[in-house]
Amino acid sequence: MNRILSALVAGLIFGLGIAISGMGNPAKVLNFFDPLGTWDPSLAFVMGGALITAAFGYRLLFGARSAPLLDTKFHLPTSKVIDTKLIGGSALFGVGWGISGFCPGGAIPALGFAPWPTALFLISMGAGILLARRLQALPRRQTA
Amino acid sequence: MITDFTPYASLFGGILIGLGAVILMAFNGRIAGMTAMLGGVLEPKNPDSPWRLAFLLGAIAAPFIATQFGAEFSFASPTTGVVLAIGGIIVGVGVTYGSGCTSGHGVCGLARLSPRSLVATLTFMATTFATVTLIRHGFGG
């Protein structure tokens, strides 16, 4: 129960941050990537603020504690593999982000203040996630 | 479509995003990656689903509550309809194969100095830039 409550609080702060920062506004996000046109460099301040806060916070946290307050260990990704799956998937994500102006972290909070067309994006994105999971679950050709 | 340059609001919002990520790590020991969060919701039997759902609900509720108290967040979507849906499907496939998005790789991963996240972030920033440039300025620039 406490874990659910702390996740809720973290989500509230995260979502408010997205809304205030402009990260949930597709027009603003797309303008960051258009220095040749209607450039809006605000996104650099969002990423900078988030990154510096998270980097310092994580450093303090990992230095002070060996486990989180409500669990027995920190669940950190262990994979170190840099492969075509990581690069291809990320490249594809960028194409979709460039088309729509929505990333998952921006779209979820945007649902709270601009339900349409955010819902259309999120439903399509959910379909994309399920499609990719289905594809990943298919039996692989044996290469060995 | 011109949008206002908002360095202070964006920096403040960014700090809140980072703070949310730190709180989730401090209490739950988890990365605040939206991709993983959504994945958890798509598998209701996963034991991580309840807290992931709570995070998502909080993220939607905060801006909604703020607007009820008179806050206004600027919003404009240059794309809608079929194009937006295609963009959404591509994002969904991409973040699943790439194991993360702007929050997971771009904020939490980079904050942990993860080489995987650095490669992922540089890759999607580059293809986003290329896509926007191509759509808005065509092949000739």
Image (cartoon, grey):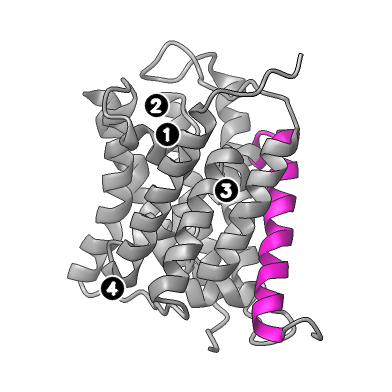
Say if mark 2 contacts mark 1, CB within 8 Å.
Answer: yes
Q: Earlier in the sequence, mark 2 or mark 3?
A: 2
Residue extending furthest front? Answer: A141
Alpha-carbon span between mark 3 and mark 4: 33 Å
State the residue at coordinates (19%, 69%). B69
Name the dominant secondary structure of the magenta segment. Answer: helix
The residue indicated by pointer 3 is B94
Q: Position of residue B58 (x, y in %)?
A: 28, 47
Gap between marks 2 and 1, in whole Å?
Answer: 5 Å
Mark 1: which secondary structure?
Answer: helix
Q: Earlier in the sequence, mark 3 or mark 4?
A: 4
SS class, disc 2: helix
Identify the residue at image location x=76%, y=13%.
A144
Q: Residues within 10 Å of mark 1 (few under 14, many from 20)?
A: many
Q: Are marks 3 and 1 in contact (CB under 8 Å)?
A: no
Label 3: chain? B
The residues bearing labels 1 and 4 have C-alpha atoms spaced at a distance of: 25 Å
Which amino acid type is marked by label 3? Gly
- Residue at 71%, 77% in the rendered image: B133
**Numbered label attached to residue B71:** 4
Question: Is A81 situated above or below A127?
Answer: above
SS class of the residue under badge 4?
loop
**What is the magenta range?**
B110-137
In the image, what residue occupies the spot 25% across and 25% down? A2
